[in-house]
Image (spheres, helix red, strand yellow):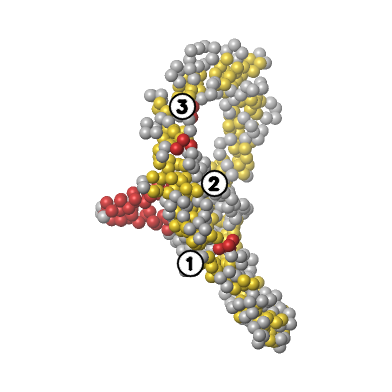
Amino acid sequence: MLFLLIAIVFTKEDQSIRISQSCATNLTGYFWNEQQCIKCKQPSCKCSSSQGCDSCLNQYYYDSINQSCTPCPKGCIKCCKSPELTQYICTLCIDGYIMINGVCLKVEACTQISIHGRCQKCFDKHFLQETCQACPTGCSACDSKYYCTVCEDGYYMTINQQSVSCLTCNILENQDGCKSCVFNKEQLVCLECLDTYYFDQENYLCLKCPSGCFTCQDPNQLPQICYTCLPGYLLSDDDSYCENCQEQIPNCMKCTTNERSRNFQCIDCNNGYYLTTDSKSCEPCNNGSNNFRRCNSEILPTQCNVGYLLFKESNTYTCIKNIYNCYTIDNTQGQCHDCNFGFNLVFDSALQMNICKNCTQNIQKCITCDVDNDKQLICKECNDGYFGNQCVLCTSNCQKCLNESQCQTCIPGYYLDDLQQCQSCEVSFCLECGGLKECIKCEIGYGLFDTICKPCLTGCENCDGDLDKCNICRDKYYLTTTDNNCKRYKENCLATNVNGYCYLCETQISFDESRNLFYDEGEETPIFDEQSDSQFFISNNGYCLKCNDYITGSFNCPQICKVDEDFAQYLLPIILILLIFQ
């Protein structure tokens, strides 16, 4: 049993690695279908098909029922859903936020915060004065904006009657390498240089080391200039300068360095190049031609450029241009096997092969398409006012029809006469009528009174028979039991009982969904920035009160929610393993 569980875990891990390498490192919002990268249902999810999300990016809640991703509240890395249905509760906060009662509160340079949301201690280079405020320039510690206690490297302390401040050691233009300095005979003298700088003893200046050097000496004191190198650099063979990976291994995207052997080793190459077996060079895929995006050798692509499909034939892989919006193809001519979302597989007689056509582009006014027995595109459902496989226009004022002359239903405000033609009811605000001036049903907000539509009271959707009493209320209104009128929900309320007692309150989360749709290896995952503070409201004596009030420091949000499915999925194998060893 234990081996089976471990095998399952490794299989899933290998699969996820294979998919991420097929599309792009750390890529989300896409999945690999063996021939190309396909968009997921949402850019914020990770998926293995276009049907829905398997899991979500951080800062998103995974809805397993709808297989979709919903933004967590501001500041959350992980969140879960509470029994109150609308409430999202944070279980883990991002850096710069602190958890209080299921809400992530922005600390604003604060390292310690009270249960009421008040700051008690600040980050370095800040002082506490109700809130955390930055120290003056050059101070690494201060008691106020006028009193520095410790200066940063590159600054010296000066005292006057009103303040203690830190002034820069680097007063000369283009001189910024001095770490510590003193006044000597009313002249500023540098004593020590910052890293990556060396001391010019003749001029008492700190000058920049050559590129890549961490420590170095005056270039005039040859032969050696650099002593040690920055990360990612190694000393050259003659110990005179520091080389980086890209200089030694062109087109290398990621590499490691071995200080002892002074050796560069490439881990991964840029797109269009493959890593040689000795990991010491990146060679072009097929000499840079044929639209190979990723490859394992000169002739073995693992992924094609965008707009091309990876196709295998007789143990040979090639990149075929995706001309016809195929999901996958069957041959090197680009014949479609199945289609991308929104396209249908049809037979093109001129090309003598299967291609994909878009429904709405090829049949105007069509909602959904299908193919007939001859593999030709036909419409299954047309917009109102159109009919048939090619969506032909119905007669005037007709909503649904069998053909150009036979109407089945009319648009609101019209009725069907004996000749299956639509005639005006001639009744204002009428939705459905049986004949001339014979209204049967009125538009929303109007009531039927002697075959005429008259306006209902505010908030009422239907008041047939009695204009002073409502039958159905509009959204955000509830029907009173005393006088059958509609009263508006209390502010921020989503649902009430018959007495107007609010038992369900709303949640307001606003996120910026903009992002790159297809980003490449080496690029960071796009950030989903908050537009504003997330606001949560909780029912209290029938009113919706803010559970997270950043101004007053009151945080009374619900702290209990169902188990995070994502967490439970990984927890189950661990529990089983523990049971085996009991």
Q: CA distance from mark 3 to mark 2?
A: 31 Å
What secondary structure is found at the residue carrying circle 3?
Answer: helix
Horizontal arrangement in the rendering, residue 169 relative to residue 236 (left or right): right
Q: Residue at x 26, y 55 (%)?
A: 1
- Vertical placement of residue 521 versus 178, above or below: below
The amino acid on which the numbered mark 2 sits, given as a three-letter code, is: Pro
Q: Is residue 112 visible?
A: no
Q: Quadrant of the C terminus?
A: bottom left
Q: Find residue 119 and report its horizontal and vertical position in percent.
A: 57, 46
Residue 107, x across and y down, in percent: 56, 46
> How dense is the environment of label 3, judged by Cα within 10 Å: few (below 14), some, or many (20 and up)?
some
Mark 3–mark 1 CB contact (< 8 Å): no
Coordinates of residue 517 in the picture (x, y in percent): 54, 49
Amino acid marked by disc 1: Asp
Query: Is disc 1 placed on a helix, strand or loop?
Result: loop
For disc 2, the marked residue is: 526
Q: Compared to 13, does 156 lie above or below?
A: above
Q: Whole-Å distance between the Cαs marked 3 and 1?
A: 60 Å
In which image quadrant can residue 297 be found?
Answer: top left
Badge 2 vs badge 1, beta-carbon distance below 8 Å: no
120 or 357, which lies in front?
357
Please tell me whether mark 2 sits on a helix, a strand or a loop. Answer: loop
First in sequence, mark 3 or 2: give its number: 3
Of residues 113 and 497, the one nearer the viewer is 497
Q: In the image, which is nearer the foreground, mark 3 or mark 2? A: 3
The residue carrying mark 3 is 248
Earlier residue among tags 2 and 1: 1
| Residue identifier under label 1 | 374
